[in-house]
Image (spheres, helix red, strand yellow):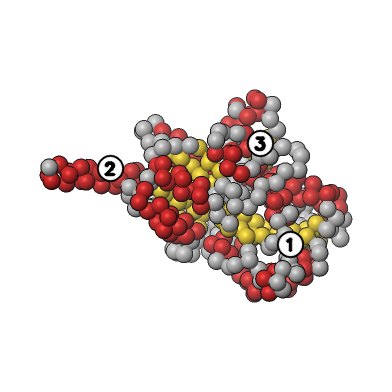
Amino acid sequence: MHEGHEEKKKAMPWTKVCIDKNEFEAGLGREGLRGISYREAIREAQRQMMEKDERVFILGEGVDDPGGIFGTTSGLGERFGQERVMDVAIAENGITGVAIGAAMAGMKPVFVHMRMDFLPMCMDQIFNHAAKWYYMTGGAVNVPIVIRSIIGRGWGSAAQHSQALHALFTHIPGLKVAIPSTPYDAKGLLIGALEDGNPVMFVEHRWVYDYVGYVPEEIYKIPLGKGVIRKPGRDITIVAISQMVYEAMKAAKVLAAEGIDVEVIDPRSLKPLDEELIFESVKKTGHLLIADVACKTGGVGAEIACRVCESVLEYLKAPVARVNFPDVPTPCSPVLEEAFYPSSTDIINSIKRVINHGRSKESTSQHYYACAQ
């Protein structure tokens, strides 16, 4: 089906990233392909899985509100009733325990946290229970829960309402972490997560909810651990996470005009990570930049850089670079926000530094070689 490393061989509809609706309509839309938004893809995946499997239900604060969690659950309460779309109390840790208990009893809960900032209240339940029961029971009890959590810049949301903490969950054995960037992946990975049988942290970026992309009407799944090449290139590899995929694609267009051919990789899930896809790309390009929607220290970019250095260091022509948030709390001021959040411009500048470093290194090596002769 639409999954696995077959996606590397040629650009298919599900690999393409559309910066806006006009780009979709000018390309895939003209081919007669169906396009819906990221939020619609999330909602459709939940609806279809609830229709298919009566064990699937949704719970969370405000899931049945008119806004429906940025539109991702709107209408589902009316369709399936309060027993399967459950508004819950503002008691994150306790309700997380309820959801985990339901999963252990054979249900398939989709537990929605509107903001990832408040997941730290649930860490004991997630880290010490959801993640460990399968191992501690010798495989007798699994916890098939999907925890949807939303990250991303708001409108002056400041330090307590705009954090991206996905790297914390990659550190815990027993948890899986999905972080789709496109509507196609949002639907396919959510279905894949619901059928995975393990606890999955499903991370969504609020800035991509309006983005439109190709999404088939039928049920399909993307297994966790399969990345995709969004754009092939020969000069540098960008591993772009979540919303940074779109910034990377913008940067690639600008750099192409300057003769720099960028390869953009979207890992789609962070745990498991499709490291082989990244390694093969680095072997080809010799340069690597990782763009993430989180602070730098201890982030996912550090893990990816380390794995590359452990496995394919000899192919690198320059040090690995990272584009991240600075290691300070998120500011509230719009002016400071503009300086805080990285964009395609930051990616462009970082890529030029990496490429120039590699060229300088090559030039120096050639000079030493000539002198030796």
Question: Is residue 179 shown above or below 299?
Answer: above
As shown in the figure, which amino acid type bears the numbered disc 2?
Arg
Q: Is residue 213 left or right of residue 331?
A: right
Question: How far separated are the C-alphas under marks 3 and 2?
Answer: 39 Å
In this rendering, the count of numbered labels is: 3
Ranked by sequence position, the earlier of labels 1 and 3 is: 1
Where is residue 127 shown, x and y percent of the image? 63, 71
Question: Is residue 203 shown above or below 37?
Answer: below
Give the number of the mark in front: 3 or 2.
2
Residue in view at x 42 percent, y 46 percent:
282
As shown in the figure, which amino acid type bears the numbered disc 1?
Pro
Give the residue at mark 3: 214
Disc 3 on helix, strand or loop?
strand
Residue in view at x 66 percent, y 60 percent:
200
Disc 1 on helix, strand or loop?
loop
Where is residue 51 shown, x and y percent of the image? 84, 49
Pick whichever, 73 or 46, lies toward us. 46
Identify the mark at residue 359; answer none if there is no mark.
2
Give the residue at mark 1: 144
List the single residue furthest toward the top. Answer: 30
Question: How far separated are the C-alphas under marks 1 and 2?
Answer: 49 Å
Question: How far separated are the C-alphas under marks 1 and 3?
Answer: 28 Å
Residue in view at x 12 percent, y 42 percent:
373
As shown in the figure, which amino acid type bears the numbered disc 3?
Tyr
Ranked by sequence position, the earlier of labels 1 and 2 is: 1
Where is residue 288 shown, x and y percent of the image? 41, 48
Ranked by sequence position, the earlier of labels 3 and 2 is: 3
Disc 2 on helix, strand or loop?
helix
Q: Is residue 39 left or right of residue 239?
A: right
* Res 246 visible: no
